[in-house]
């Protein structure tokens, strides 16, 4: 499994941005989402779902704790995914959750039932963090 440190660093950086955003920016709409907080929550939900999938568990509902908690939720979900990927056995496949209302890295990933490897999950997660960071800039 590739080193997940870049994911932790990217998630921490984005989470810090959300923690320091004023309410007006948090609640400001961005393309595809009612607010920046909603975009971050969608990313956190996808990261949490990917972490559970990497652990071989069913995806659970990820609560909306409000706009001011989204930075912490993002950090927790990202760290959970990094830990799950670090514990993933060599050659294991992960059947990613669908994007639902959130990020699109999982579009078609594992749609044939075979899943993707840990490196692909990590690359997709990094891409989604970067996309959300750009969207919410």
Image: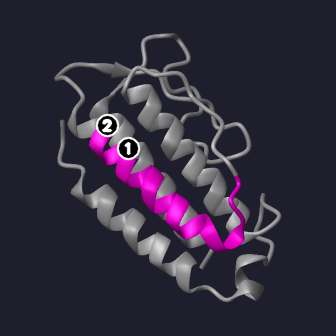
Residue situated in front as seen by the camera: 119 or 18: 18
**Residue sitting at x 27%, y 59%:** 6
Image position, residue 73 (x, y; %): 54, 59
Image position, residue 55 (x, y; %): 37, 26
Compared across the picture, whether 41 is left or right of 83 comes to: right
Residue 132 falls in image quadrant: bottom right
**Residue sitting at x 49%, y 45%:** 47
Image position, residue 37 (x, y; %): 69, 68
Q: Secondary structure at mark 2?
A: helix
Whether label 2 touches label 1, CB < 8 Å: yes
Mark 1: few/some/many CA within 10 Å (<14, 14-19, 20+)? many
Q: Is residue 118 above or below residue 42?
A: above
**Residue sitting at x 55%, y 86%:** 20
Compared across the picture, whether 48 is left or right of 9 comes to: right
Quarter containing the N terminus: top left
Query: Which label was assigned to residue 84?
Result: 2
Question: Residue at label 1?
Answer: 81
Magenta stretch bounds: 64-83
Mark 2: few/some/many CA within 10 Å (<14, 14-19, 20+)? many
């Amino acid at each position: 499994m590739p080193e997940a440190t870049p994911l932790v660093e990217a998630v921490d950086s984005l989470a810090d941005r959300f923690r320091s955003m004023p309410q007006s920016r948090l609640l400001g709409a961005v393309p595809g989402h009612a607010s920046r907080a909603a975009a971050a929550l969608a990313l956190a939900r996808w990261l949490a779902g990917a972490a559970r999938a990497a652990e071989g568990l069913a995806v659970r509902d990820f609560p909306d704790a409000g706009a001011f908690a989204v930075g912490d939720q993002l950090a927790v979900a990202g760290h959970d995914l990094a830990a799950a990927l670090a514990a993933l056995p060599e050659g294991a496949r992960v059947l990613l959750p669908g994007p639902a209302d959130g990020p699109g890295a999982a579009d078609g990933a594992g749609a044939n039932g075979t899943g993707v490897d840990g490196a692909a999950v990590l690359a997709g997660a990094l891409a989604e963090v970067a996309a959300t960071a750009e969207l919410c800039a």
